[in-house]
Image (tube, coloured by chain):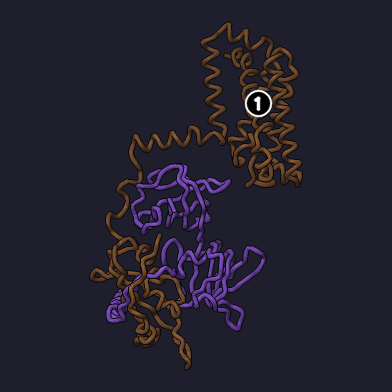
Chain colours: A purple, B brown
Amino acid sequence: MTSRQEDRRGLGRRRFLTTAALSGATIIGATALGGIDADAAFAAEPSLDPAIAKSSFVEGRITGITGSILEVAGSYGDHARVQMTNATSVWKVRATSAAAIEIGDGLYARGVPMPDGTIAADAVWVNIVNLDTQIRGIAKNRLHLAHGQHEVVGNVLPATTNASYAGRALTSDLSQLRIGQSAQVLGAWRPSDNSVDVVRISVGH
Amino acid sequence: MLSLTTGLAPLVLAGLLGWTGAVKLFSRGTVLGAPKTALARMLSSSERAALVLRGVGAGELLIAAGLLAVPANPLPGAAAALLGAGFLGYLGYGRALAPESSCGCSANEDTPITWRAFARAAVVLVSGVAAAVAHGSWWSTVSGRPAGSLGFLAAAAVVLIALSADLDRWWLLPLRRARLRVFGHPLFGTGAGDRVPVAASVELLENSLAWQAASPVVRSALLDHWEEDGWRILLFSGVYETAEGAWPVSVVFALDATSSRDTPGDPVVRVSFLDADSGEPVGAELLSTVPSRKALPLAS
């Protein structure tokens, strides 16, 4: 199949899904329960979400990729094999596909244990980091952050880096960041230069 | 210039050692910070590390006093050079042993071991040697060439402050703040205007009743997203389970592309479960059982 045909198929699929979504049930209302997104990778307590209760969790560095299986060396000497499926969501700075995963990347994965010992992944977060930092410098395309003893360079990515001020909704406006502020940074670690691509920076939280 | 350097080296060194020594010896931060230093790792005891830090502080004060009182005597200078060499060795060892630990150089700050700590220790070593070989006293140099001495001392102070990572917040951050004030915020106007980022739509979705209703089915995180006719479509995958079995499904949500958590009013979300293979809608009963009640306002 050529990429053009794939594109057309993708577009057709999107249109089909759009139609399906718009003809679905309409539900109005807000709740404070929250859900399984990137933050769930760092949840200290088990979630009440029924999807998570049945799941197991894998964390570590990817040491090998065989077909659709990721070999993961855990931080505590354990080892896991993570099976990617076409229903697995992949986060690497943004929602992307399994093709973006590289050997040497860090990984958090949530999935279901299979009889053969692999874990069929529901969701995979690649190189995700969640840092408690202080803003020490602001430049056009990067932030200088202090994380405990470490100095961290945070790359500002156009159309990807968002900020939340004092608990308000995420916005792409970063001009209210100030030097000296405490900032919670959710981002993706770059193994090549140890910097962090800033995806979400929360200040005044 | 050389005579100025050797003549005033004892004074500069005494200032530096007097400051770091006093902080180490008298600051309560010494005990608090000691467990984080590389020294604590080396001695495998925070108490011993604090004791050693206090001892080094006392030694530094003694050397500083010696440099000030008897600048012609090579002993304080030699001791300072020895101290500088010791610092360099300790920093090198600490860097290799525990690169994340603090150097404890002035004991009151969490300053990691960086090139600046090495440079400052090297300054102590070099000026210690200079003080040891100096012949005259610093006060004769100052009275002989007051303008040159003042300039030299000012330059030395600037260099030492720049090399002290624990003083950054007193000059580096204010300097950077001032630069932002003068030249404007570098990130001003780089955002996409009023456009609501996808992450904000996901956030809104996760705070909606629709998400709560669909969450028993949703298994993945965000798979894909796109916009059509003012709607933002968010695609997830999941498993729809009934008594008869479990089916993989796509879960599609449609939200107003311009609303976020800050938009007044309740979020309106359309949601559908579609069989992953056939594309047929399934599980509509799960979604129709959601009570159409108003959410109570939350105090936040």
Give the quarter of the image for residue B195.
bottom left
Residue that protrudes farthest toward the left in the picture: B229
Chain letter for the residue marked with disc 1 in the picture:
B
Q: Mark 1 — residue? A: B17
Q: Position of residue B235 (x, y in %)?
A: 37, 74
Report the side of B297 relative to A65 (left or right): left
Report if residue B297 is visible in the image. Answer: yes
Check the image and report above or below for A144 versus B75. below
Residue closest to the eye, A151 or A83: A151
Q: Quadrant of the N terminus of chain B?
A: top right
Report the side of A158 relative to A134 (left or right): left
Q: Position of residue B240 (x, y in %)?
A: 44, 85
Disc 1, SS? helix
Check the image and report above or below for A1 versus B61. below
Classify mark 1: residues with Cα within 10 Å, few (<14), some (14-19) or many (20+): many
Residue that protrudes farthest toward the bottom in the picture: B244
Residue closest to the eye, B159 or B178: B178
